[in-house]
Structures are given as structure tokens and as C-alpha cells.
Amino acid sequence: MKTQNKPTSLHYIISASLILLLFVPLSASAQDANSIDTLRQMGKAFAKISEKASPAVVGIKASQTVTQQMPDWPFGDPFSDDDVFEHFFGRPSPRQHQRSPQTPQTRKFQQLAQGTGFIVSADGYILTANHLVGEAEKVMVKQGNNQEIEAKVIGTDPDSDVAVIKIDGNDLPFLELADSDKLEVGEWVLAIGNPFGLTHTVTAGIVSAKSRSGFRLAEYEDYIQTDAAINPGNSGGPLLNLDGKVVGINTAIISPGGRSYWAGNVGIGFAIPINMAKSIYKQLVETGKVARGFLGVGIQDLTAENAPFFGLKQDTKGVLVPEVTKGSAAEKAGLKPGDVIIELNGKPIEAAKELQGRVGSLKPDTDVELVVLRDGKRETVSAKLSERPAKGQVAKGGPETLEKLGLSVQNLTDDLAKQYGYEGLTGVIVTQVESGSIAELAGITPGALIMEVNRKPVENTKAFKQAIEDAAKEDAVLLRIKQGQAAIFVVLKLPKEKG
């Protein structure tokens, strides 16, 4: 009787390989099916959000009459249709008799802006962008395929670029507002609007970043950045989360030509956080204007460069106070120049724009608690906010020259103090700044008042020059200056003396 050969290790390997060959395609196919199903479910989710939200998204057309100064062309206006007609056909345009009588130097025309808004209440209140309707003489709103109806401008806030308009109606579809503070980078968001007049266009993307600022599009900037496509006509439209709730108001983009409300999309769009808009909306509806809290301090970012001058580590986060306004809430609370604000009402503060936005979102007479670093030590101060005053203006401006810094200064006289608005202050006034100098690169301009050098007051040019000479042994010097109504700390990198 023959005995069976025992399976060798090679047999095991071949068998295992055959089993793998049988199952791997099936496994890969199953994975592909799962991936496709996941994408399909995501697409359906986007479709449901769009279907639910779109009826509350409206198109907006805002118009105003603009008077434009025209040059005195020696051979007629080259941009006039009538002049072009006469140039090519040798006779006056048949439309010339319709011209309205105007002076040759000016031309009036209707300027039209198109954008988006979204209804936030059943009785027709609409949130949109201030740059769209702020200067408008007439605002028309279109819901879906319905006819355009005229809207009333309830209130506008250029400082935040938020505006509220209203149409008449009952039981209108409206969008719910989310808590934008809970929004996380990487979350999916949808933008709905009317780019280039294409109504109810939906785009999807993610939250690319939060708390973007420094674009000078508005006084208060704390933008949500998204790569959801935003184009001209999207301004004022909603940015939605996956619950279909509004997390932001689409307002601007960055394009190859720079930051803009109107340029084409390249995947860097910005939205005003809806939490900022909520308090503004409430005030505009109730009073037609926005009253903001005011602390009364000049502020700037604490940086790795200036932190050591205040006895702090280079990685310390906070907001530097170069100036405290006389009689302000900050002065009454005991804040001092050189303090570093690190908390407001128990929440950390890391940037000047963040502090400005959070204080501005509070109403006047609100009590706040601040934590500051003073000479490296933590202190807690309480303040009652006043109301933010109207913006002021700067002036301009005799001489001791410091070639090292590239500027000239002179003593502050009573006449100069009155001229520049520096009454009651001490220091030396900058009369000239050399082009390309250290001072110019630091942003110092003629008319600036230098009040301190390395945190010590200087009362005349002699004291100032001595203070600079004393600081020459170091690599840098800290100046406390006032330019117009704003005081800031400026770090100047000093040139090394040749030995």
C-alpha cells in the first residue's frame, strides 16, 4: 500500500497564494463600493442642505446714482458711444438728441451692484454685506423665480461689513444661525449665492482657517477662511455647516490681484463669523445703528522682538498696551502703558485684532475683567466699558538729527503740541525722516511724538539723544511713539558700531 506524500511548505505557500488571489479582488471591489457609497451619501447630504436652505437665500440688486468727473478731451470723449458712432460713420449718432443736459466736466450714471442675502426671520429680515447695500439708493430683492420686490435698508455697519434689510412677508422661509465659535478647521461648509448673476449656485469646501485679519477690508476683522468657491455675486450670502445652519456671511476673496470684494475665486474666500453678526443684527434691528464697547487703550501685537523689553519670554502671547486714553475706562481701571493683556473675561487673548473684536462686540457699560502682565507679574483689573467714539484724524509737521536712526527731532513746544493734538504730553517731535532709513522702515513719519526710549520718558532733544546713545550698546531700542491719535511701541534695530 502506497503511502501519501506529506504536504510540503511549498504546497502551503501555493495554497495560500491561491486563496489570496481569490479574495483580494473581492476585497478591493468591496472597498471601492464602500468608498463610492460614502461619496454618494455625502453628495446626498449636500443636496438636502441645498434644497432646504435655498428658498431662504435671495438675490440682491443695489443701485445708486454716481457722478463722475470727466477729463476735457480735445476731440470729444473717446468712451462715449455717440462719439464712437460719429468717428466711424461720419455723422452724429441717432441717439444724440436723447442726451440729458449736463456740464461737459461731469457725467451721471446708475451704478448697479449684485449680490446675495439670506432671510433670518419669518417676517422678512435679511442679513447681507454692507459693501453691497451701504451706499445704495434702491435695493431690490428676488426670491427664487419670483418677481423682484423693493427692500428697506434697516441699518448698515461699515466697521464689520454687515447690513440688515427687510422685505414684507409672513411665514417666509428663513435660515437658523449656528454658533461659529464651535466651528473647527477642516469642517465641511457650503456657500450659496448668485455668482455672476447665476442664482442659487451651491459650492462646497472646508474651513481652511479661522480668525484671519489684517486685510483692511473692515475695521473689525475676524474672518473664517474657506476654499468653497466664492465669486462676484456671492457677497452677503450664507456659509452653511452640515446642519444647514449659517456659520458665516461670505464677504471677500484673495485673488492674484490682491484682496477684493469682487475679483475671481482662487480658493481663498472669507466669511464674517455669524457670532459677530448676531449682536450687530440685533442692534441694527432695534436701533438702526451699532454702539460698541470701548476700553480706551492703544493696542498692538506682542511679538518675539518686543517681548524681552517687557521682561517676557519671546513666546509669550498677548496684546501690548502702548497708550491709555485719559479719562477712559482703561485709565479708571488702572491700566498703564507697557501692560500686556493676556485674558478678557476668562478667555485668552493672543492678538490685537482679537481684543478689538471682542471688546467691540460688547455693549457700552458692560463690566469686563482683564488679566494683564505688568513687569512680568499677573494682575487682574476690572473695567466698565464706555461707548466707542467717532474716529479721529492725524496732523503733520524743526531740528536735531540722528543719522544713526535717519530722523530729525525737535522739542515739543506749546504751538506744536496744539498743532498736532499733543497737549498735555511730553516728548520730542519728529520733523524729518530719511528715505530708506531705519526709522522709515519702522513706519515712523514726520509729526510723530517720541515719548519714551526703552520705557523711560524723554522730555527734550538732549535727553532723547542721550537715551539713544545709551541704547547703542544693544542691538535694538524700544520707542514709545504717538502718531496722530494712536500710540505704539516700535523696535528699531540699531546698526553695529565699528570697532
Image (cartoon, rainbow, N blue to C red):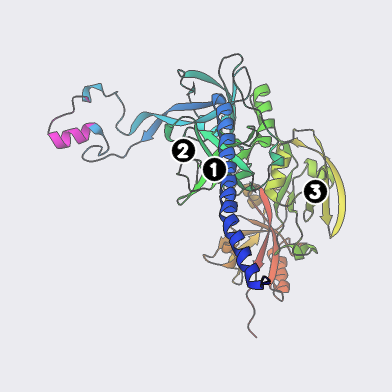
Q: Residue furthest front?
A: 1
The image shows residue 491 at horizontal and vertical percentages of 67, 64
Front residue of 198/490: it is 198
According to the image, label 1 marks what residue?
Answer: 228
Q: Position of residue 489 (x, y in %)?
A: 69, 58
On the image, numbered disc 2 is attached to which residue?
232
Quarter of image, res 293: top right
Q: Position of residue 428 (x, y in %)?
A: 67, 59
Give the crowd class for mark 3: few <14, some 14-19, many >=20 residues within 10 Å.
Answer: some
Estimate the x, y position of residue 228 in percent, counting from the top left. 54, 43
Q: Name the foreground residue: 429 vs 193.
A: 193
Residue at 83%, 45% (x, y): give it: 346
Q: Residues within 10 Å of mark 2 (few under 14, many from 20)?
A: many
Q: Which residue is mark 3?
A: 343
Q: Secondary structure at mark 2?
A: loop
In three-dimensional space, the C-alpha distance between marks 1 and 3, rounded to whole angstroms, equals 33 Å
The answer, for residue 118, to whether it is visible in the render is no
At x 58% / y 56%, what residue is drawn?
22
Left or right of 368? Residue 23 is left
Q: Residues within 10 Å of mark 1 (few under 14, many from 20)?
A: many
Residue 344: assigned label? none
Query: Do callouts 3 and 2 mark residues in contact (Cβ within 8 Å)?
Result: no
Please give the range of residues in magenta: 82-95
| Image quarter in which the N terminus is found | bottom right
> What distance separates the C-alpha of mark 3 from that of mark 2?
38 Å
Specify which label sits upstream in the sequence, 1 or 3.
1
- Quarter of the image for the C terminus: give it: bottom right
